[in-house]
Image (cartoon, grey):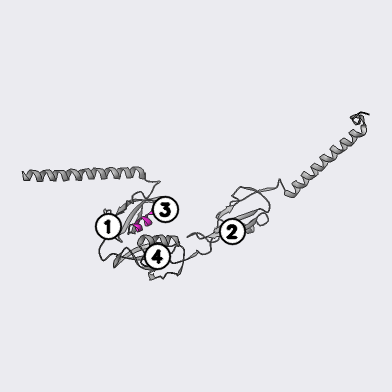
Amino acid sequence: MGVFSFLTNKKFYIHLFLIILVSIGLFWSIFYALKVFTRHDEVYLVPELKGNKFSDAEKEYQNIFNFILIDSIYVDGAEKGIIVQQDPLPNSKVKKGRNIYCVIVAIEPERTIVPNLHNLSLRQAIVMLETAGLVVENLVYVDHFARNAVIAQHFEGKPVESGAELYKGSKIQLVLGNGNDEMLTAMPNLIGVHYFEVADILHYASLNVGKQEAMDADTLNWRVYQVNPNDKMVPFGTKINLVLCSDKRMDFDNYLKEIEAQKMAFDSTMVLEENLDIIEIEYDDF
């Protein structure tokens, strides 16, 4: 008999057909079982949870998702317990029982330790307060030989010692020496600066934020439109009054160009007047 004589045997084809049939049935059974076990076609859209209370979201979707609180942050003015971040993001397709990780607004602000600012320079003190999560309220200058050095630190009008615990975001008043003299500091250029940057710029220049007048209610987009006083040099601790305007209402790029053009014209006039004065003096000497 030949090597391939089995190909003429009907039993071979019957057995081959049965093997193929069993294999197909086995593969179909496996895939069907996996589909049932993994619920492949059963997906849910993750809802928008941001702005909802964590406890309410957990109660409403407890039969679909597993909620896990991973962190809490303090947001000044925000309602406590509100979800501010979620993972997976809204409209993500997930299976039933998926973990939903949430970050919420803390019930109370985080506490921090007041650093020792005594005898530090103003710049060093500002950096240390920022590192500790505290804010400079204002600067008070008193007669003292150590110019721009911290003499005392106050919280809510009373001395606060280093090592004390305060909520992050608390405002600290710095008492500094004036070098026993009325010192002047250069007035920083604030026109067009975003409102949220103004306090830091003024404090680093040994100045304070004064009265604030707003031309609109668009607080997120406020920029400085005018300042008073507007002198080149002002005494330490001077309160700088601000007029604020939204950059949605005012084209600050063109406004700054106009100011620069006016300044150049003024400087040119001053130079011309000075030259004319010199010519008159020389003519009189003649």
Q: What secondary structure is marked by label 2?
A: strand
Relative depth, front residue between 213 and 170: 170
Q: Residue furthest right?
A: 1
Crowding around mark 1 (Cα neighbors within 10 Å: few <14, some 14 to 19, many 20+) is some
Relative vertical location of residue 61 with respect to residue 284 in this rendering, above or below: below
Would you name the residue on which mark 1 appears? Answer: 234
Precedes in sequence: disc 4 or disc 3: 4
Q: Amino acid at mark 1?
A: Val
| For discs 2 and 3, the disc positioned in front in the rendered view | 2
How far across and down, in percent of the image, does residue 113 sit? 46, 67
Per the rendered image, the range of residues in magenta is 196-204
Q: What secondary structure is marked by label 3?
A: helix
Q: Residue furthest left?
A: 286
Crowding around mark 2 (Cα neighbors within 10 Å: few <14, some 14 to 19, many 20+) is few
Would you name the residue on which mark 2 appears? Answer: 70
How far across and down, in percent of the image, does residue 91 sit? 61, 47
Would you name the residue on which mark 3 appears? Answer: 219
How far across and down, in percent of the image, does residue 89 sit? 59, 50
How far across and down, in percent of the image, does residue 135 sit? 41, 61
Would you name the residue on which mark 4 appears? Answer: 172
